[in-house]
């Protein structure tokens, strides 16, 4: 009996050992925890913006005339800049003249980057329209919806876009009420406004008054809603998809100066070019401070007009004159100026710290004229007329 119990014990021990061994051998392998960096690709694919040129045999005469014009304004009016003209979505003329740096005698090139001044406003308006298409904002929203302490009540995003807000000039606020040595950013100035003594000019919607303040507030809204800097938002949604490699938003003392970034000049005593220094207003973006080249602006205009960036509905709103609450038309859409009696011409001029800029879009003619300059040239409207006249008379297409 004793031996029988021993045999049973040995048998049980063997069975237990085999079971344990079998469990370890045949247990399904548990998945291992692998820590892996997940890279989310949110970058938009490149859009179709071909940089195409007219055949030289068709543009020989118009190029000769425009070259003569460029040399003449350079000599007589101290023009140092770039001109690009496109017709039927092809470039007719692209040229530069003068110096980027007068001390070092460095010439302006195709990749010289100009401060666009108020031509920057169209990018701000487009950013707002993109957020609207994504249902992140409504044009009827008031500024207080995003900034509850904003002291000027009942101003809508539409009021900001078409300059019917009546807001005071932020230049005065920055120059008289900003106490820090460093210039304020958009967020800084938004926070200063509640304590400002500046009064608005009129109640929202009653009149048209061109307002840089409105566009700095719009850029602040873009940053608040998107959770990213204004430059990052524009770069991700517009500049990179369009291949605008030389376009960016620059905020003084917050961003580094780029390799091809130009400085503005003024002519002193008819011969000497003096650099124009920065001011307390130069860290504010949205109303200005986009830098670009003529060719990048061509890509921008092409992409916008082809509704690759925004819907036709959004573009139509941008290209339509605004109205006051009394029904009077104002000579401004969203980010673009327009003539009261000429819906064909959509344009914007800019002037800031020595830079003079113009982007003119003749819709019915499918003609785009881009002029960028950095030595305080002051005859932009006249120059645009001369360029259009030359193209009309000497380009046979």
Image (spheres, rainbow, N blue to C red):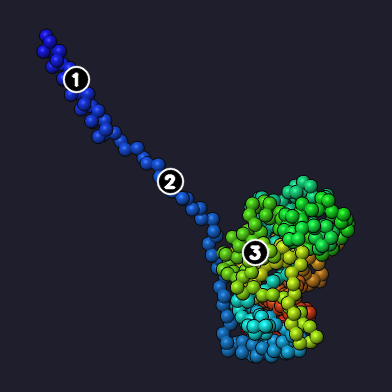
Give residue 35's mark.
2
Q: Quadrant of the N terminus?
A: top left
Q: Name the residue located 73 percent from the left edge and 65 percent from the top edge.
A: 282
Query: On the image, numbered disc 1 is attached to which residue?
Result: 12
* Left/right of residue 31 with respect to residue 336 in the rendered view: left
Query: Of tags 3 and 2, which is closer to the observer?
Result: 3
Q: What element does badge 1 sit on?
A: helix
Which callout, 2 or 1, points at the residue further toward the start of the chain? 1
Query: Of tags 3 and 1, which is closer to the observer?
Result: 3
Percent across and percent down for residue 316 are: 70, 63
Q: Name the residue located 59 percent from the left edge and 69 percent from the top edge.
A: 244
Which callout, 3 or 1, points at the residue further toward the start of the chain? 1
Query: On the image, numbered disc 3 is attached to which residue?
Result: 255
Which of these two is toward me, 14 or 154?
Answer: 14
Crowd class of label 2 (few under 14; some 14 to 19; many from 20; radius 10 Å)? few
Give residue 99's mark.
none
């Amino acid at each position: 009996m004793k031996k029988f119990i021993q045999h049973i014990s040995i048998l049980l021990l063997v069975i237990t050992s085999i079971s344990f061994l079998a469990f370890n051998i045949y247990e399904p392998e548990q998945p291992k925890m692998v820590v892996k960096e997940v890279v989310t690709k949110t970058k938009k694919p490149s859009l179709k913006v071909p940089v195409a040129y007219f055949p030289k045999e068709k543009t020989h005469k118009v190029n000769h005339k425009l070259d003569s014009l460029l040399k003449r304004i350079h000599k007589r009016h101290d023009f140092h800049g770039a001109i690009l003209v496109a017709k039927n979505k092809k470039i007719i003329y692209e040229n530069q003249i003068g110096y980027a740096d007068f001390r070092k005698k460095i010439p302006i090139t195709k990749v010289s980057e100009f401060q666009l001044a108020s031509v920057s406003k169209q990018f701000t308006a487009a950013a707002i329209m993109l957020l609207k298409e994504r249902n992140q904002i409504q044009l009827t929203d008031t500024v207080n919806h995003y900034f509850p302490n904003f002291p000027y009540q009942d101003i809508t995003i539409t009021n900001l876009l078409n300059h019917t807000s009546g807001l005071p000039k932020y230049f005065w606020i920055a120059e008289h009420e900003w106490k820090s040595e460093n210039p304020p950013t958009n967020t800084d100035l938004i926070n200063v406004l509640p304590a400002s003594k500046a009064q608005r000019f009129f109640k929202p919607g009653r009149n048209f008054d061109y307002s840089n303040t409105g566009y700095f507030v719009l850029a602040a809204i873009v940053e608040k809603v998107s959770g990213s800097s204004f430059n990052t938002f524009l770069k991700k949604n517009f500049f990179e998809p369009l291949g605008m490699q030389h376009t960016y938003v620059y905020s003084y003392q917050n961003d580094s100066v780029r390799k091809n970034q130009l400085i503005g000049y003024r002519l002193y005593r008819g011969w000497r070019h003096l650099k124009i220094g920065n001011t307390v207003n130069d860290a504010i973006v949205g109303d200005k401070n986009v830098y670009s080249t003529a060719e990048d602006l061509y890509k921008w205009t092409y992409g916008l007009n082809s509704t690759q960036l925004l819907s036709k509905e959004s573009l139509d709103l941008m290209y339509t004159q605004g109205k006051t609450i009394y029904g009077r038309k104002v000579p401004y859409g969203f980010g673009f100026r327009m003539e009261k009696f000429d819906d064909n011409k959509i344009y914007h001029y800019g002037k800031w710290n020595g830079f003079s800029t113009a982007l003119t879009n003749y819709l019915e003619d499918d003609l785009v004229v881009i002029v960028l300059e950095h030595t305080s040239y002051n005859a932009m409207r006249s120059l645009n007329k001369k360029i259009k006249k030359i193209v009309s008379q000497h380009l046979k297409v």
